[in-house]
């Protein structure tokens, strides 16, 4: 580096003493105010478009706010929230969200660990394997869900064709969208497909920071590769595991794109003919922009926010517990 | 006696089982994208064929032509809109986040650490939950249904500031900043001629990740742009897939057209994207 050339020569090392007052003032202004000018765009834009909507959401949730009847605007107290408690659509959506969440998170993170373990070797074409498994992460969910819609089609779908090869559903093809369990599996498959590679890379980067002598010491006990993974590697990368559990909790409970696009008629936001796979995020969209009841949608957003906080907390605790026991 | 086991996995050469496993993972990862292409090139008959056809057909351009000329979908315009939205968001994120990252990493000012803590806190705010109020806000400003409504919330990101600060902290030597200051360079000048050249790799990483996220964003663009003449490509796709009778070869030709730009990015910048995700993991 040519660092030394840029070092100040002696005659420069005195600050601009001889210079005019204006220049000195400018210099002071620059060193004192510019840092704030540099960070201001972030804080201003975030305050307006990030923070304000979340705070204002609380106000909206306490009001009657209908897009079709703007005159009805007024305080509603906790009416929107009490309505939630007895709204069967909400509880159904909550049930669906958790069902899909479990079916997608658990296999996703376990498979990601296994893929990361495969990648954590000396490999030919190392970078290309890593790039390859990121393909699902880059593919737009809207586009990939459309492919999966064809894959899980009732008539002439590839999934049903596979099933028929092993002897299932030959007399009557499975209608994947018709039932809770089958639509949940289909949607969870899409979520798993998208996020396994991404999580595998997160795990891989943590695995590579594990000191090598840890493994050498453990070999004395005769640990095989599989036990090595579960007894040494996983506990050592526990902080990243907790991080991915929190990330996928936040993402999974807000699931929107997959159930939206899996619907026969995506714009209806109904999540199947009997709401069998309607998630909360989808219900918020439907209540707000199809039923035009923004106040109620805001209340639902708050409820979802609280649920996410609680579940993320529980999951983080559980993951820590499991890791600590090993 | 000594088996492979007492070596760390990262020192172990992958055996055939490793490669077999990885090939399976890769095939599963790539298949849906490949199959999207196959259907995009097929006739209606080939789409509903059993066993399914996995060989591309010959009418990609016919299918694409149908998508691009479909009434009320504005598909061609939507691709341009997506380029504008993602491009502006990426450029603004790079500029604002590197400015703030530079200030937090190299400049001294009161409340610096407290403000950086606020940035980290904002990382945890799930702003998807504010969409109702964001919609009302955009309505008051009069931006709903315009690209501005999609662009404005994406102009900065807390992750970007955080990532830039970490990178600038060790990519730019303090002495260099000091000596430039003594030579009379303004802070802006230092940013422009010392910091920016030094952080090009980080700009590439953050730029790619930001572009991909902006391109794939669906929920908020759907809320604010649905039913207008200015959809993003994701909104146009959902329009294309809605209706009583959906023609899959056409829908997937659209999906393919909206996916190709990202596949090109993966080919050009795959290395950077991988690095960005892995570095982000270590730091968080």
Image (cartoon, helix red, strand yellow):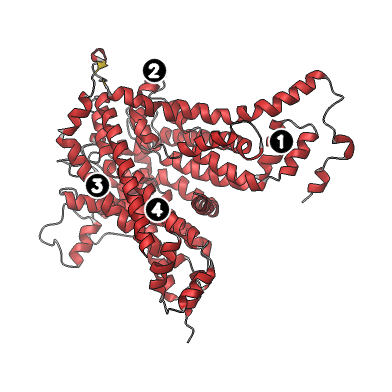
Q: Residue furthest left?
A: A171
Give the distance between the C-alpha atoms of the residues marked 2 and 3, in whole angstroms.
35 Å
To which residue does mark 4 refer?
A242
Discs 4 and 1 carry the same chain letter: no
In the rendered image of this protein, does residue B214 appear above or below residue A314?
Answer: above
Q: Are marks 2 and 3 in contact (CB under 8 Å)?
A: no
Q: Closer to the camera, A70 or A53? A: A53
Q: Closer to the camera, B58 or A168? A: A168
In the rendered image of this protein, does residue B193 appear above or below residue B143?
Answer: below
Q: Residue furthest right?
A: A11
Q: Closer to the camera, A30 or A218? A: A218
Percent across and percent down for residue B89 are 50, 34
Labelled disc at residue A98: 3
To which residue does mark 1 refer?
B190
Horizontal side of A12 relative to A126 (left or right) equals right
Q: Are marks 1 and 2 in contact (CB under 8 Å)?
A: no
Q: Tag 4 or tag 3, which sits nearer the N-term?
A: 3
Discs 2 and 3 carry the same chain letter: no
Q: Are marks 4 and 1 in contact (CB under 8 Å)?
A: no
To which residue does mark 2 refer?
B140
Discs 3 and 1 carry the same chain letter: no
Density class for disc 4 (Cα within 10 Å; few <14, some 14-19, many ≥20) is: some
Secondary element type, mark 1 = helix
Which subunit holds the residue at mark 4?
A
Discs 3 and 4 carry the same chain letter: yes
Which subunit holds the residue at mark 2?
B
Q: Tag 2 or tag 1, which sits nearer the N-term?
A: 2
């Amino acid at each position: 580096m040519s660092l030394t050339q840029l070092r100040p020569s002696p005659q420069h090392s005195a600050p601009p003493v001889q210079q005019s007052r204006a220049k000195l003032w400018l210099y002071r202004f620059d060193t004192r105010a510019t840092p704030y000018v540099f960070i201001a765009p972030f804080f201003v834009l975030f305050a307006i478009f990030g923070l304000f909507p979340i705070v204002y959401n609380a106000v909206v949730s306490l009001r009657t706010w209908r897009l079709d009847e703007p005159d009805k605007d007024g305080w509603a107290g906790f009416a929107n929230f009490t309505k939630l408690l007895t709204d069967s659509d909400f509880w159904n959506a909550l049930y669906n969200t958790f069902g899909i969440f479990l079916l997608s998170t658990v296999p996703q993170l376990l498979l990601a660990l296994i893929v990361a373990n495969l990648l954590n070797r000396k490999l030919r074409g190392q970078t290309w394997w890593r790039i390859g498994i990121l393909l699902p992460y880059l593919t737009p969910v809207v586009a990939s869900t459309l492919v999966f819609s064809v894959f899980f089609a009732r008539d002439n779908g590839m999934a049903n064709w596979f099933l028929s090869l092993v002897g299932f559903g030959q007399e009557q093809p499975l209608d994947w969208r018709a039932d809770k369990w089958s639509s949940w599996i289909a949607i969870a498959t899409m979520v798993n497909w998208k996020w396994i590679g991404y999580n595998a890379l997160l795990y891989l980067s943590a695995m590579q920071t594990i000191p090598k002598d840890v493994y050498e010491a453990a070999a004395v006990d005769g640990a095989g590769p599989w036990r090595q993974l579960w007894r040494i590697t996983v506990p050592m990368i526990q902080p990243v595991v907790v991080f991915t559990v929190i990330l996928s909790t936040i993402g999974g409970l807000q699931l929107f794109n997959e159930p939206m696009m899996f619907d026969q008629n995506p714009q209806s936001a109904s999540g199947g003919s009997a709401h069998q796979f309607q998630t909360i995020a989808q219900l918020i969209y439907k209540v707000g922009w199809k039923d035009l009841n923004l106040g109620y949608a805001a209340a639902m957003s708050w409820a979802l926010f609280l649920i996410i906080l609680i579940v993320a907390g529980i999951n983080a605790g559980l993951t820590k517990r499991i890791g600590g026991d090993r | 006696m000594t088996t492979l086991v007492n070596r760390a996995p990262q020192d172990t050469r992958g055996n055939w089982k490793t490669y077999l496993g990885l090939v399976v993972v890769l095939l599963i990862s790539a298949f849906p994208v490949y199959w999207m292409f196959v259907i995009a090139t097929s006739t209606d008959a080939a789409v509903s064929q059993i066993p399914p056809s996995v060989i591309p057909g010959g009418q990609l351009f016919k299918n694409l032509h149908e998508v691009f000329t479909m009434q009320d979908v504005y598909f061609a315009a939507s691709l341009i809109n997506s380029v504008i939205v993602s491009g502006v968001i990426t450029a603004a994120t790079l500029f604002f986040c590197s400015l703030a990252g530079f200030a937090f990493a190299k400049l001294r000012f009161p409340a610096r650490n407290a403000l950086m803590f606020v940035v980290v806190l904002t990382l945890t705010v799930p702003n998807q939950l504010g969409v109702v109020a964001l919609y009302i806000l955009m309505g008051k400003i009069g931006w709903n249904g315009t690209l501005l409504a999609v662009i404005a919330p994406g102009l900065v990101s807390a992750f970007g500031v955080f990532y830039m600060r970490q990178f600038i902290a060790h990519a730019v030597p303090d002495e260099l900043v000091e000596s430039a200051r003594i030579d009379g360079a303004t802070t802006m000048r230092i940013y422009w001629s010392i910091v920016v050249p030094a952080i090009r790799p980080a700009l590439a990483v953050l730029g790619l990740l930001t572009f991909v996220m902006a391109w794939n964003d669906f929920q908020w663009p759907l809320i604010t742009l649905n039913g207008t003449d200015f959809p993003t490509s994701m909104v146009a796709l959902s329009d294309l897939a809605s209706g009583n009778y959906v023609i899959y070869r056409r829908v997937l030709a659209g999906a393919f057209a909206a996916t190709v730009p990202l596949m090109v990015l993966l080919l050009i910048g795959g290395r950077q994207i991988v690095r960005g995700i892995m570095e982000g993991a270590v730091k968080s």
